[in-house]
Amino acid sequence: MVGRAATSSAADSSSARTRTIRTLGVDLAATAAATAVAAVEWSAGESRLTDLVVGADDATIVALAGDVDTVAIDAPFGWPIAFVGFLAAHNLGRAPIAALETVEDRRELTRRRTDRHVARTTRITPLMVSADRIAHVALRNAGLLACLGMSDADRSQGPVVEVYPAAALQRWGLPNRGYKGAAGATVRAGMVDALVERTTGWLDLGPYEATLRADDDALDAVVAALVGRATAIGRTEPPPPEDAAAASFEGWIQLPTCELDALIGL
């Protein structure tokens, strides 16, 4: 389980200024080989990347989560409620007879409310958890959440939260496309340059900067840890009232509502 209580509201930001807190970012994949995890330590006026593991299994993630305030995981936390109900009915031979011929017909079964919100507000569309390869990641994440003691928790908030690095980068005005794999090496190097420039004086990447340039999973893990900080100080977007109940089951992607430098300023 996460070792320390998360600072989850703006009202708690004063306590965040007076003590060191840690956020853990996880770029989760279907396999350990493609999974990266990054720990960032925050204290008065500064922060530093203290741990970065590429090729992280669940045991490594759980161990690193044992002494952090917020764990931010780049993976879906749940499935659309309509999809879960559809599967249950289908297995009993009671699936509703309705047209499911087109992609639009199947929209309620494939897109969570948070997916639609992110697409609408950032123009970046998350993968479909019930109809894409990201489903393997979601299945692994369900097991990881159980290991972290979060299997029965509200999936829209808390010390363990769902994040989407590309959307966060877009919110912060940083490059967010075309940086994956060997083909994205040049774009990724520019992203790291931009991140270093925007965080000069308060984020110390230590010996890990070269790893961020070489590995997009590592870079996403660090971005996830930064969003974890935004969550810890109450500077992310909550579900609107009409989506809150569903988000507690489906999960909710935390989008930062503050500028990047505000992460250290609060």
Image (spheres, rainbow, N blue to C red):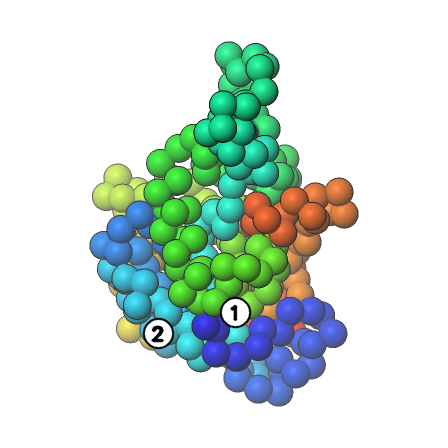
Q: Which residue is mark 1?
A: 70
User: Looking at the picture, does residue 39 appear above or below residue 183?
Assistant: below
Percent x, y of residue 201 = 49, 74
Q: Tell me the mark number nearer the camera, choosing from 1 and 2.
A: 2
Percent x, y of residue 185 = 28, 46
In the displayed orientation, state which residue is furthest to the bottom. 18
Q: Secondary structure at mark 2?
A: helix
Apparent side of residue 32 relative to residue 71 in the rendered image (left or right): left
Apparent side of residue 202 relative to residue 56 in the rendered image (left or right): right
User: Looking at the picture, does residue 207 appear above or below residue 28?
Assistant: below
Q: Within the image, what quadrant is residue 212 found in?
A: bottom left
Percent x, y of residue 235 = 66, 62
User: Looking at the picture, does residue 14 appear above or below residue 177?
Assistant: below
Identify the image quadrant of the N terminus.
bottom left
In this rendering, does residue 266 appear at all? yes
Tag 1 and tag 2, C-beta contact below 8 Å: no
Viewer-proximal residue, 148 or 12? 148
In this rendering, does residue 205 appear at all? no
Q: Within the image, what quadrant is residue 36 found in?
A: bottom left
Percent x, y of residue 82 = 59, 33
Question: What amino acid is labelled 1 in the image?
Answer: Thr
Mark 2 surroundings within 10 Å by alpha-carbon count, few (fewer than 14), some (14 through 19), many (20 or more): few
Q: Which residue is painted at 51% across and 19% down in the image?
A: 103
In the displayed orientation, state which residue is furthest to the right. 241
Viewer-proximal residue, 110 or 189? 110
Identify the image quadrant of the C terminus.
bottom right
Residue 63, numbered label: 2
| For marks 1 and 2 on the same chain, the one whose residue lies earlier in the sequence | 2
User: Looking at the picture, does residue 71 appear above or below residue 238?
Assistant: below
Q: Which residue is painted at 46% across and 38% down in the image?
A: 129
Q: Which residue is painted at 76% across and 47% down in the image?
A: 241
